[in-house]
């Protein structure tokens, strides 16, 4: 077990800081640090145990026992629903406990509970006592209910904003690798002749003990609300938690998005044994292979999030993930329609059929995009929830997750009873995912905007950001930048971990596509005082309100897009905003920024024809950049000094831009 104990500020303190000594250079380096590694292995052992136990039980009742009251096609759904039920009943209480007590102490207590549950399960396997094992499914659901809020509240307490996506990616990857290994081990052990059930029993107890040993090395994580009075009424506290989450619109709707992901995933995971047996005509090894492919895919997608997001919480990946989930879920239906009919494929004969490789490719890609979808949503909830009630917000997430997963089990069971085949159910799920995703992204335009910004900065341009640690991850600030193209605002959105409200010329809102994007981003239209005094004053009033609400305000002080590629004189609008804010008792920092190499690109004004003419001459895939300088206090942020700072950043003089100016 790694023992290095690198000190790190809390998530609230660390957010937005530069990579300090001790901050992990990448997500894998976290495994060498005590603040993360013991927690990771505790979570890993618990997830492996959950799935070894559940999959062994599912295989046992699907392939080995004949139970009239639990048909094989419904066994996976019933076990999944029973496991999820405690999330619905006890998440509200567990969220309160995670906020009120030291998280490390709670993790260790939960791991003690796991040992007791697995001792009972060991007896159930040896005796082939299915009712006792189903009771243990419920109890392991209770164990996971208690562990869930403390798990996701622990990460932002010990990781900074630039580590949060990578840390969540590692946890998601580890979880699905554990699901994979646990499920494969459960399927293989339970199938061993004569001694299979005993081996499963021993493995469950051993993993519970291993998780408890790892938990002993987790450093303390103090309570964030030690004075919280526990409300033991699950009904009223559940309602209170949901209202608490609903108070933060982006967080609550992200919770809805995660809950849908669990609805989607639960249908696939619970269907694998029956899908392998009835559709693919395979044995237990084929069912384990499907879980292997699915788990590896989610793990790879989770790890890709840090690379694709440049170590920020990049929710622009969520629409990309949703698109992939639907595309490959639908193709899985078509791939499974014309499979060869055969009784009892073993693993080798299954892999020898070319048609089966398309099924596995669909599963792998579907699960990879599921990882891209889920990790940024979890990171956003952790980042934007107040530390004092973060665990209760996560408990609200677990409650809704449970409702959606139970609903998925009920719906899938009803469809099966109505005569729908498993491939048809997967098709319906893929189509429904497309509809739900569009609905969520219209409800929360930030996801769609970030996706547009991500596409522009990764696929249209080759975008390099320097000094992005100077963009505040919390609190109000004014961002000032040079104005080179029609997509400058979108590129700045791609660089910021938080939404930015821009002041923009009212005429740009009439542009066919960009105008719609800027309206969606709630940009503030402005006109000259002579042209429209009311719009002029309203823009300044809205800008100051943005700062009062603790958000980021973006301004292009040149007043318009450059027509010759040179930096134009800065106007005094930024001073007026800062003065109005100071008159209201608010002093905010001003962050200078410089967009580089955009002049001459597709969206700039370089020729008589204007922007977006002759795209191939201008080079759609230009290498462009953003240099961000250190923030200035409001008192020093005059137009002249800001222009000088931006000019220095344009010249690549980071040191000069950060030096004090007269």
Image (cartoon, rainbow, N blue to C red):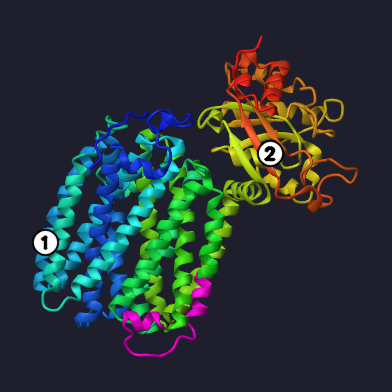
Which residue lies at the image location 37% right of the left edge and 78% below the top edge?
Answer: 275
Front tag of 2 and 1: 2
In this rendering, position of residue 101 left or right of residue 636: left
For residue 111, above or below residue 329: above
Which residue lies at the image location 35% right of the left edge and 35% below the top edge?
Answer: 158
Give the x, y percent position of residue 622: 71, 46
Q: Which residues are magenta?
A: 329-352
* Residue labelled with disc 2: 489
Badge 1 crowding class, 10 Å Cα cut-off, few under 14, some 14 to 19, many 20 or more, is: some
Cα distance between the residues tagged 2 and 1: 59 Å
For residue 120, which numbered disc appears in the image? 1
Residue 5 in sight = yes
User: Is 287 within the magenta?
Assistant: no
Give the x, y percent position of residue 235: 31, 50
Q: Quadrant of the C terminus?
A: top right
Residue 57 in sight = no
In this rendering, position of residue 112 left or right of residue 266: left
Judge by depth and name the residue closer to the eye, 553 or 25.
Answer: 25
- Which comes sooner in the sequence, label 2 or label 1? 1
Which residue lies at the image location 42% right of the left edge and 34% below the top edge?
Answer: 160
Give the x, y percent position of residue 214: 21, 45
In this rendering, position of residue 184 left or right of residue 13: left
For residue 522, above or below residue 430: above
Question: In the structure shown, which secondary structural element does the residue marked by tag 1 occupy?
Answer: helix
């Amino acid at each position: 077990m790694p023992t290095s104990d690198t000190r790190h500020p809390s998530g609230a303190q660390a957010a937005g800081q530069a990579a300090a000594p001790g901050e992990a250079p990448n997500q894998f380096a976290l495994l060498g640090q005590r603040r993360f590694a013991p927690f990771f292995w505790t979570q890993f052992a618990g997830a492996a145990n959950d799935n070894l136990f559940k999959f062994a039980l599912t295989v046992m009742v699907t392939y080995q026992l004949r139970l009239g009251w639990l048909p094989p096609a419904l066994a996976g759904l019933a076990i999944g629903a029973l496991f999820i039920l405690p999330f619905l009943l006890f998440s509200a209480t567990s969220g309160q406990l995670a906020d009120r007590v030291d998280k490390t102490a709670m993790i260790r207590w939960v791991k003690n509970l796991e040992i007791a549950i697995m001792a009972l399960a060991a007896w159930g396997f040896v005796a082939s006592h299915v009712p006792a094992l189903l009771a243990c499914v419920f109890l392991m659901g209770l164990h996971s209910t208690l562990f869930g809020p403390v798990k996701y509240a622990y990460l932002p307490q010990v990781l900074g904003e630039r580590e949060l996506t990578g840390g969540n990616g590692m946890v998601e990857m580890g979880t699905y690798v554990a699901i994979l290994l646990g499920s494969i081990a459960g399927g293989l052990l339970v199938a061993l002749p004569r001694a299979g059930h005993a081996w499963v029993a021993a493995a469950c107890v051993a993993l519970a003990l291993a998780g408890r040993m790892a938990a002993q090395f987790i450093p303390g994580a103090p309570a964030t609300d030690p004075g919280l009075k526990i409300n033991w009424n699950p009904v009223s506290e559940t309602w209170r938690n949901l209202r608490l989450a609903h108070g933060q619109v982006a967080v609550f709707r992200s919770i809805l998005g995660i809950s849908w992901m669990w609805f989607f995933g639960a249908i696939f995971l619970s269907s694998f044994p029956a899908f392998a047996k009835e559709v693919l005509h395979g044995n237990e090894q084929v069912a384990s292979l499907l879980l292997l492919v699915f788990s590896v895919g989610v793990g790879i997608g989770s790890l890709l999030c840090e690379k694709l997001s440049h170590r920020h919480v990049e929710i622009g990946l969520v629409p990309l993930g949703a698109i992939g989930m639907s595309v490959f879920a639908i193709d899985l239906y078509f791939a499974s329609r014309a499979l060869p009919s055969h009784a009892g494929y073993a693993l080798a004969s299954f892999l020898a059929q070319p048609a089966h490789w398309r099924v596995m490719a669909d599963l792998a890609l579907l699960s990879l995009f599921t990882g891209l979808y889920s990790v940024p949503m979890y990171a956003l909830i952790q980042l934007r929830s107040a530390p004092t009630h973060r665990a209760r917000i996560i408990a609200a997430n677990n409650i809704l997750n449970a409702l959606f997963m139970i609903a998925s089990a009920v719906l899938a069971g009803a469809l099966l009873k109505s005569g729908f085949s498993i491939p048809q159910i997967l098709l319906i799920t893929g189509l429904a995912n497309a509809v739900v995703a569009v609905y969520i992204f219209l409800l929360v335009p930030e996801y769609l905007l970030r996706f547009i910004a991500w596409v522009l900065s990764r696929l249209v341009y080759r975008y390099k950001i320097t000094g992005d640690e100077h963009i505040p991850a919390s609190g109000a600030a004014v961002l000032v930048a040079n104005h080179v193209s029609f997509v400058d605002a979108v590129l700045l959105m791609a660089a910021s971990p938080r939404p930015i409200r821009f002041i923009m010329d009212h005429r740009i809102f009439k542009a066919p596509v960009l105008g719609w994007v800027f309206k969606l981003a709630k940009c503030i239209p402005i006109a000259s005082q002579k042209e429209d005094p009311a719009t002029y004053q309203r823009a300044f009033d809205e800008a100051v309100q943005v700062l009062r609400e603790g958000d980021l305000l973006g301004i292009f002080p040149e007043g318009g897009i450059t027509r010759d590629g040179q930096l134009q004189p800065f106007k005094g609008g930024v001073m007026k905003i800062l003065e109005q804010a100071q008159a209201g008792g608010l002093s905010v920092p001003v962050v200078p920024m410089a967009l580089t190499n955009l002049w001459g690109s597709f969206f700039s004004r370089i020729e008589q024809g204007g922007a977006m003419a002759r795209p191939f001459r201008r080079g759609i895939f230009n290498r462009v950049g953003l240099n961000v300088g250190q923030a200035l206090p409001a008192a020093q942020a005059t137009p002249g000094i800001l222009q000088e700072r931006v000019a220095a950043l344009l010249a690549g003089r980071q040191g000069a831009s950060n030096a004090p100016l007269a």
